[in-house]
Amino acid sequence: MLSPERLTRFARHIVLPEVGGAGQVALTDAHIVLIGCGGIGSPALQYLAAAGIGRLTLVDSDVVEASNLQRQTIFTPAQIGRSKALEAAEWVRRFDPAIDTRAVVDRVGRENAARIVDDADLVLDGCDNFATRLAVSDACVRAGIPLTSAALGRFQGQVANFAGHLPGEACYRCFVGDAFDADDCDTCAADGVLGAMAGMVGSFAAMQAIRIVLAGKTALGDPQWGKLQLFEGLAPSLRTLKIAKDTECRGCNL
Ligand SMILES: [Zn+2]
């Protein structure tokens, strides 16, 4: 049951037939682990917090840099040099103290991914490198946790929901293959990115994550597994690609 104060806060959700009171309770009961509190993660966590997700675990090993401020809008110049995960958790606590928020200052890799995603209902990955993305995806498949994966470069954004633990459904590794496990580049630093694109892709990823939380509970809950939404910002367009399950994939054929 939601308190009168919470009913007022989420009134515009509850009035939607596709969310409703049952949907808002499901959002309140959900635990989302967010990998990366940067360009994608910072707008994503704002909309996850605004949606009333009851538990948020915010994971990032980096500190805020001056060059982040062009797109990571939860941070201010006063926070330069401080931990992104800790500052992001502070942002959430100021915004809604009712959310159970935890910061994890750690880089996610093969050795710790399983522990970090452990009791999540879903993981939203908006990190900046393939090695972490693949480690997170493999850990999610093994633990039976759905994954919203979002990526960004220059003027292009990609968002997809994966459920590689379900029969016939692709995982993130089915999509990108094995070539990138050792890849550790930060493409934003090398290629640049339009800041507004980060806001668009981050909030889009939050919407796709909310869809997963509501799956089986409300009409909005079609999780659209394996459908990659490809947003082009330069000449704006949105395309949908279906990612096929790779029967040889070592991430999801366990
Ligand atoms: Zn796979």
Image: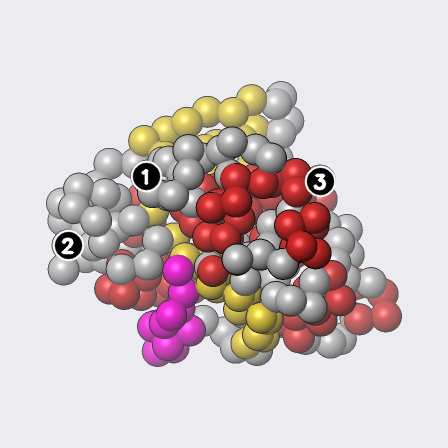
Residue at x 76%, y 75% (from the top left corner) = 81
Instruction: Identify the residue under disc 1.
Output: 226
Residue at x 31%, y 65% (from the top left corner) = 139
Q: Would you place residue 79 above or below residue 54 in this image?
A: below
Say which amino acid is labelled 3.
Ala
CA distance separating discs 3 and 1? 25 Å
Point out the stretch of residues depicted in magenta.
109-121
For label 3, the SS is helix
CA distance separating discs 2 and 3? 38 Å
Q: Name the residue nearer the viewer: 23 or 206.
A: 23
**Residue 196: numbered disc:** 3
Residue at x 52%, y 25% (from the top left corner) = 238
Q: Would you place residue 102 above or below residue 235 in this image?
A: below
Could you say where residue 30 lies in the image, as x and y percent from the top left? 46, 59
Could you say where residue 157 lies in the image, as x and y percent from the top left? 54, 38
For label 2, the SS is loop
Q: Is mark 2 within 8 Å of ligand 1?
A: yes
First of labels 3, 1 by sequence position: 3
First of labels 2, 1 by sequence position: 1
Say which amino acid is labelled 1.
Gly
Q: Name the residue nearer the viewer: 223 or 245.
A: 223
